[in-house]
Amino acid sequence: MKAVEKIKSISNSWIAILALGVALGGFFIGNGVYRAASTRTVTVKGLAERDVVADTAVWNIKINRVGGDLATVQSQIDSDIASVYNFLAENGFSTDEIQNLRVQVRDKFAGYSDAELRTQNSNGRYVIDTGVMVRTGNVATVDAASRKMGELVRRGITVTEDYSGPMYIFNGLNDIKISMIEQATKNATAAGEQFAKDADARLGKIKSANQGVFSIEARDPTDRWSSDERQSINKKVRVVSTITFFLK
């Protein structure tokens, strides 16, 4: 009788152990399936754009004079600079917004021997390059005045061939960064939710995110000139955020 009870006890123990093993196996299998499901992800991009207007203009007006007598050329340059200042004053600029550029003097005959110099026409020997720089927040005033450069030419002033017009700068990027990142994140989330819906899933938490690089472009690029962001008053700021979401 005792032997029979002992056998029953052993059997019950094995049944309990087997049941526990089945339960644990089911748990680990189920947990493994859950973890596998939780590693499904989707990576989406969110774009944010904003139109902005330049708040600073830098305008270099470069001029030069050519002649055979250095003192005479310098005197002409002095007169030209005064005319440029008058032109700018007439168009609404103050002297605080204007400064002279450096003066560069070139001697085209530098290195020539005395014999060679006697055979040259010295009328164009010396070239003086200089000009003025305007830096101002009156962007519209610069834009309007830069369209009147023909007036300087009519006053006998030689505007050099490397004249490229005003440069327009936007300094307010830090003021709009946060709101633009928020917008890019919302757009990325909307794209992720749509993808999850199409995949018969639900969007989970963020696994990783990359805010991307802010870029500033010309708002209305129609040709090579207007495509240069520096030449454009109206600009477009862009940022693309890349976000990876878990899928449920």
Image: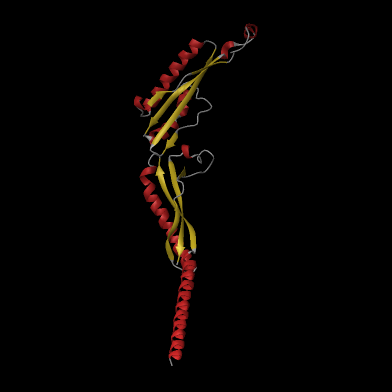
| Furthest residue in direction bottom, as rendered | 1
**Does residue 15 appear anywhere in the picture?**
yes
- For the residue pair 31 and 223, the one nearer the viewer reads as 31
124 in relation to 225, above or below: above
- Where's residue 166, x and y in %? 45, 33
| Residue 174 left/right relative to 42 | left
- Where's residue 3, x and y in %? 45, 89
| Scheme of colours in the image | secondary structure
- Where's residue 209, x and y in %? 44, 54
Q: Residue at 47% x, 71% y: name it.
A: 28
Q: Quadrant of the C terminus?
A: bottom left
| Residue 188 left/right relative to 121 | left
- For the residue pair 160 and 148, the one nearer the viewer reads as 160
- Where's residue 111, x and y in %? 61, 12
135 in relation to 173, above or below: above
- For the residue pair 95 and 182, the one nearer the viewer reads as 182
Q: Residue at 42% x, 35% y: name it.
A: 143
Q: Quadrant of the N terminus?
A: bottom left
Q: Residue at 46% x, 85% y: name it.
A: 11
86 in relation to 32, above or below: above
**Does residue 147 appear anywhere in the picture?**
no
